[in-house]
Amino acid sequence: MIAHNLDKVNARIHSVGHDQAVQLIAVSKTRTSAELQLAVDAGQNHFGENYLQEALDKIDSLKGQNLVWHFIGPIQSNKSSKIAENFHWVHSVDRIKVAKRLNDQRPDAMGKLNILLQVNIDQELTKSGFLLDEIASVVPQIENLPNIVLKGFMCIPSQANPAESFAKMAELLAKYPAMDTLSMGMSQDLELAVENGATFVRIGTDIFGARAAK
Ligand SMILES: *Cc1c(COP(=O)(O)O)cnc(C)c1O
């Protein structure tokens, strides 16, 4: 089932005309290592996790398979060291302080940590992330930190008009020629995100099925 779902999601990505490379991230929060292993066996190697402790357990039990781990959930400052030590990418950086901590805590031997700034693109009270207006002053404060690389931006749009939200994200990225990454698009709005320049899409439900309420 998971292998078949991955085929369907990859076909949806390819069904949309796009010039950019698009990498599928399987969002595996609440899923077991056995479920992730089925996805790995079907060729999936990028995984996105929201909750640190369950992610660490899965990273450990699936090690040695060249997987790429993305942290996409809320970041509590006191958890940042484990994130810096165990992930390749962090999409949910929403405070300058968190970027600095990740930089300071990144082990040298792992190379630079790739980060994205989360943007609260529709200015929703219920969502975290920087406002669009803040980005221009935030970027210079973190782009020269030596142990992280600021690669681009991530958003979770409101469902009111996601195409417009995604287009604003593409405009934002275009202002920064040194960056090349837009993390956007979930099960419901994957095609719209790819049409608007997404380079990472984050898909959970349409790969693993509906999640139990947490
Ligand atoms: C859960 C989650 C996803 C995946 O959502 P689905 O609707 O299950 O595809 C993507 N991004 C973030 C940040 C998430 O928390």
Image: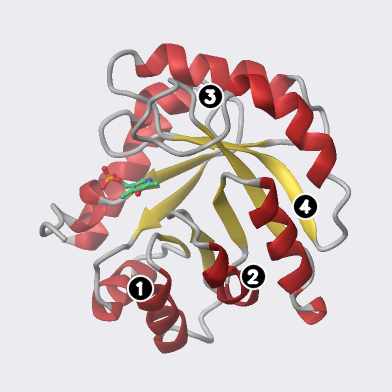
The kind of residue tagged 2 is Ala
At which x and y percent is residue 206? Answer: 22, 47
Using the image, determine if residue 142 lies above or below residue 127. Answer: below
Which is more N-terminal, label 2 or label 1? 1
- The residue beneath circle 3 is 18
> Which secondary structure lies at badge 4?
strand
Rendered residue at 28%/39% (across/down): 187
> Which numbered tag is attached to residue 84?
2
Task: Judge whether 59 appears above or below 157 on screen.
Answer: below
Sequence-wise, the earlier of marks 3 and 4 is: 3
Report the amino acid beneath label 1: Asp
> Which residue bears the numbered disc 4?
149
Q: Is mark 2 within 8 Å of ligand 1?
A: no
For residue 210, side relative to residue 114 (left or right): left
Alpha carbon separation for disc pair 3 and 4: 25 Å
Q: Residue at label 1?
A: 41
Classify mark 1: residues with Cα within 10 Å, few (<14), some (14-19) or many (20+): few
Mark 2 / mark 4, whichever is N-terminal:
2
The residue nearer to you, when weighing 132 against 199, is 132
Instruction: State whether residue 152 is above or below residue 111.
Output: above
What is the spatial separation of the Cα atoms under label 1 and label 2, in whole angstroms? Answer: 27 Å
Relative depth, front residue between 100 and 50: 100
